[in-house]
Amino acid sequence: MINSRQNYLNAKRFSADLALEHIIPHNVCFYLIPPIVELSIEEFEKLALERLKMLRLLEQVTAKNPKVSSDAWREAALQDINHEGLRTYAKLVRGNVNDDVSKAARRRDYLSHFILRFAYCRSEELRRWFVAREMELFKLKFGGLSTRDVKDFLEVYELDYKPLADEEKLEISEHLSASTANITRLKVETQDFYAVHFTEVLNLVRDRKCFLKGGTAYITPEHFAHVIGKKHQQLIEDGLKGHLRLLPTLEIDERFSMLLKSIHTSYTGKNYTVAKTGAVPIESLDQLSKKSFALCMRNVHETLRATHHLKHVGRMQYTLFLKAVGVTMEDALRFWREELTRGKVPIEKFEKEYAYAIRHNYGKEGSRINYSPFSCMKVITTPIGPGETHGCPFKNLDPSTLKMKLTGYGL
């Protein structure tokens, strides 16, 4: 029965993904149709944070290179994408390829965009930030397309634009070179030009940066990207308004409500592991807990120090956190041994039971899985029972206790 249900769910997901593949046949896309797929809350959060990391990266690149779409801006963005290991977006910004890797990347791109719409539709300030970043991502992807790729994109979305034929371009080549900045007669022969209605590029017409004839403006691919970008921007802005109307329905589920409200302030920086930063000595944990720990981890640390005891989920949550910040397995064993044996755990029981669990969390026992630390969403949604201190203090503590704790920390 279980296998039959699992086969049904797998078939249902395959069907949904197949439909999604038809919706997004190109690496550059307009996000027109909301996807209907089943996602676990873990995948939901993972997709959201991956895209958020990408958008924040673009925000930083633009702050250093304000001329979006310039060669310097694009080069800096590509370099940072590779450095941060954002493989999904590294695949999508280098042209249009119809292989399995690209299709998987398109799926992540499409789903994550709609997830973030729910997170960023709730205020004008959030909408403005999201639209600006999404436009930067669109321009980065569109700027990587070849002439053939652009043609395919226009056909997919039934946009009535196409590059000038060579004969037509030759007839007006003198006008094109005279009216377009940095374009010589020789370059006109090798570069594409697009014909658009002059109302779509009023800024270029006003500044006399394009050739205008009979209500038609002839523009370069760079300016054409702005024309398409405007359409993309309008679709996103309209979509955010639609998502705002749907938000109350989604927020009935408290887990999604908490996640969506916290996404914009979620941490998407580096994971500080031993391989990257070196070992963190356990002697520094008390100081670090006051200076650098999130409130949930500081609460767990202080409870352990005070009572020399944590229940199972609390021990797992804190062990994986210590592993992530750079505490070696040997030091973690020493830390837990010293703490728990000060309480009610005999040394023999620690070595037989607790030490195994710690080694297991470090991937050195059992299936040897390299477990990740609890995400913010997992901390929030993990149930908490009597005598347990794991979980999110902002969710689990009553307002007066939380206020007292924050005041005591000088916050």
Image (spheres, rainbow, N blue to C red):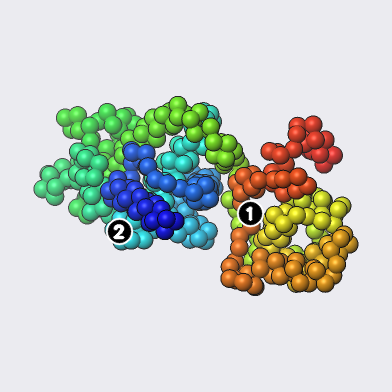
* Residue topped by disc 1: 374
The quadrant of the rendering that contains the C terminus is top right
Three-letter code, disc 2: Val
**Direction top: furthest residue:** 245
Question: What residue do we see at 42% from left, 46% from top?
Answer: 38
Relative to 202, residue 168 above or below: below
Find numbered disc 2 in the image and state the secondary structure of the residue it sits on: loop
Q: Where is residue 323 in the image (x, y as percent from the top left)?
A: 69, 63
Three-letter code, disc 1: Phe
**Residue 154 sits in which quadrant?**
top left
Closer to the camera: disc 1 or disc 2? 1
* Residue topped by disc 2: 97
Relative to 117, residue 104 above or below: below
Instruction: State left or right for residue 140 relative to residue 386.
Output: left
Find numbered disc 1 in the image and state the secondary structure of the residue it sits on: loop
Question: What residue do we see at 43% from left, 40% from top?
Answer: 114
Q: Where is residue 119 in the image (x, y as percent from the top left)?
A: 52, 37
On residue 31, the disc is none
Instruction: State left or right for residue 361 relative to residue 129.
Output: right
20 or 349: nearer the viewer = 349
261 or 319: nearer the viewer = 319
Distance in Å between CA atoms under marks 1 and 2? 35 Å
Instruction: State left or right for residue 232 relative to residue 279.
Output: left
